[in-house]
């Protein structure tokens, strides 16, 4: 065992000595591997970043580990026929459904309701267009990844009395009240003035659209302003993570009983969870990776061909050295291993340099654009492992050729 380790150390030393003896040629050889690994890493970082970005956006808007009940709620594509069937079949979700879920869902934690639309709001005659108006229950923020940074949120009393109060998003604060305390001021929604009682923390953007151009009002006030005919959206969480599936099952059963559905009838409502959304995102980004990553790996194959070519040149240049080592007792396996190790280290070094360049490039892309770049351990292992594997694969023929040299002919060839 000790002799074997000694041989591997000696073979590694000779391989590294050969690599550093021809620095410029080695670097030019590595360019293909470097570019290949950097390409795979940057593409992988983009795919992982897209996944991270989408999941964070879902968490911001829906909350984590929550379910959503609405008249129409589906994940993925829906055919025109299925959509028309849903329009005819599905029933509106009402506040009475919310109360039924709160009473009968033992596995459910906080359950909230909301209505939303986009409208123009005004302050001192100045408009803010496309503001998301959300009519919500008093416990809405228990599910949202957001807090009130100034003032307070709604109370049950505000909901019960349909108070004309509101909590504004950060965009409205910055536009209408820069450097001014907005609490107590009145903002106008259509012709109705609303007293500002709170300010929400900044969330940022999702897919280029601001999440802070929003205004929250009590759900009862929303219905007072725009009518009670609109179907509400209900969101909730389980008491614990372990009871999540049970909570969704209970909600489904409660709604089916309320809508008097027979066991063989389809749901006439939509019920999805953030886990389903996350799973769909994983499948989507996985499909992108399956298509894109193999294309970028082609550059690594090209780099492997360059490594093989240079190794063949190296074998030709070191014919006398190979013959001399064989004459002194080196076995074919020793020569084979030496050149394989050299080929592996050459390609692996290119992989490490490519990884460093990809990290720098990803940081620059993330700094100068709004694109999220995430370098995951999987892509690091894939890039470095594949580069080293390509070095071994494309080093087999040169190493085999070197090991087959006749020592007498090799020494005479010099």
Image: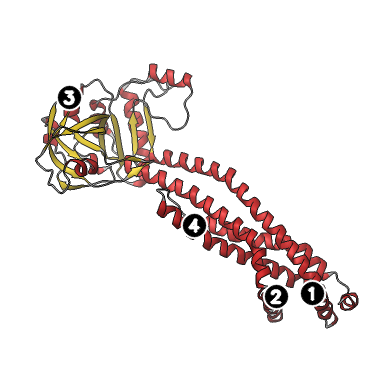
Binning the other alpha carbons within 10 Å of mark 4 as few (below 14), some (14 to 19) or many (20 upward) gives some
Residue 395 vertical placement versus 136 (above, below): below
Name the quarter where the C terminus is drawn.
bottom right
* Horizontal side, residue 367 vs residue 8: left or right: left
- For the question of whether residue 284 can be seen, the reply is yes
Numbered disc 2: secondary structure = helix
The percent position of residue 223, horizontal first and vertical second, equals 19, 25
Q: Quadrant of residue 106?
A: top left
CA distance separating discs 4 and 1 = 38 Å
Binning the other alpha carbons within 10 Å of mark 2 as few (below 14), some (14 to 19) or many (20 upward) gives some
**Residue bearing the label numbered 3:** 225
Query: Residue at the location (37% across, 26% down)?
Result: 72
* Sequence-first disc among 2 and 3: 2
The reply to whether discs 1 and 2 touch (Cβ–Cβ < 8 Å) is: yes
**Residue bearing the label numbered 1:** 318
Residue 249 vertical placement versus 10 (above, below): above
Q: Quadrant of residue 392?
A: bottom right
CA distance separating discs 2 and 3 = 81 Å
* Sequence-first disc among 4 and 3: 3
Numbered disc 3: secondary structure = helix
**Residue bearing the label numbered 2:** 18
The one nearer the camera, 109 or 402, is 402
Nearer the camera: disc 4 or disc 3? 4
The one nearer the camera, 130 or 110, is 130
CA distance separating discs 1 and 2 = 10 Å
**Residue bearing the label numbered 4:** 361
Binning the other alpha carbons within 10 Å of mark 3 as few (below 14), some (14 to 19) or many (20 upward) gives some
Name the quarter where the N terminus is drawn.
bottom right
């Amino acid at each position: 065992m000790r002799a074997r380790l000694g041989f591997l150390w000696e073979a590694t030393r000779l391989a590294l000595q050969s690599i550093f003896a021809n620095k410029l040629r080695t670097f030019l050889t590595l360019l293909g591997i470097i570019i290949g690994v950097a390409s795979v890493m940057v593409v992988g970082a983009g795919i992982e970043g897209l996944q991270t970005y989408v999941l964070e956006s879902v968490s911001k808007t829906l909350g984590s580990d929550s379910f959503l009940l609405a008249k129409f709620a589906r994940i993925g594509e829906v055919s025109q026929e299925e959509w028309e069937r849903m329009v005819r079949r599905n029933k509106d979700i009402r506040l009475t459904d919310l109360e039924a879920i709160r009473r009968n869902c033992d596995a459910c934690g906080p359950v909230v309701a909301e209505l939303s639309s986009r409208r123009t709001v005004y302050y001192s005659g100045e408009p803010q267009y496309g503001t998301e108006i959300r009519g919500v229950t008093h416990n809405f923020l228990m599910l949202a990844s957001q807090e009130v940074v100034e003032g307070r949120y709604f109370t049950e009393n505000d909901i019960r009395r349909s108070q004309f109060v509101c909590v504004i998003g950060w965009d409205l604060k910055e536009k209408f009240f820069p450097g001014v305390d907005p609490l107590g001021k009145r903002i106008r929604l259509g012709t109705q003035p609303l007293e500002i009682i709170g300010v929400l923390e900044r969330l940022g953007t999702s897919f280029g659209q601001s999440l802070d151009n929003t205004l929250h009002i009590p759900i009862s006030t929303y219905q007072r302003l725009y009518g009670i005919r609109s179907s509400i959206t209900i969101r909730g969480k389980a008491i614990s993570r372990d009871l999540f599936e049970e909570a969704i099952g209970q909600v489904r059963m409660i709604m089916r009983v309320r809508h008097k559905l027979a066991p063989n009838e389809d749901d006439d409502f939509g019920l999805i969870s953030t886990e389903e959304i996350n799973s769909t995102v994983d499948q989507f980004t996985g499909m992108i990776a399956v298509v894109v990553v193999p294309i970028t790996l082609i550059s690594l194959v090209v780099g492997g061909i360059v490594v093989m070519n240079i190794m063949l040149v190296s074998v030709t240049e070191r014919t006398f050295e190979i013959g001399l080592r064989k004459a002194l007792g080196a076995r074919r396996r020793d020569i084979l291993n030496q050149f394989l190790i050299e080929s592996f280290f050459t390609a692996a070094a290119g992989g490490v340099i490519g990884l460093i360049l990809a990290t720098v490039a990803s940081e620059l892309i993330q700094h100068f654009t709004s694109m999220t770049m995430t370098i995951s351990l999987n892509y690091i292992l894939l890039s470095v492992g594949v580069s080293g594997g390509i070095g071994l694969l494309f080093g087999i023929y040169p190493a085999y050729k070197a090991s087959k040299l006749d020592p007498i002919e090799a020494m005479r060839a010099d």
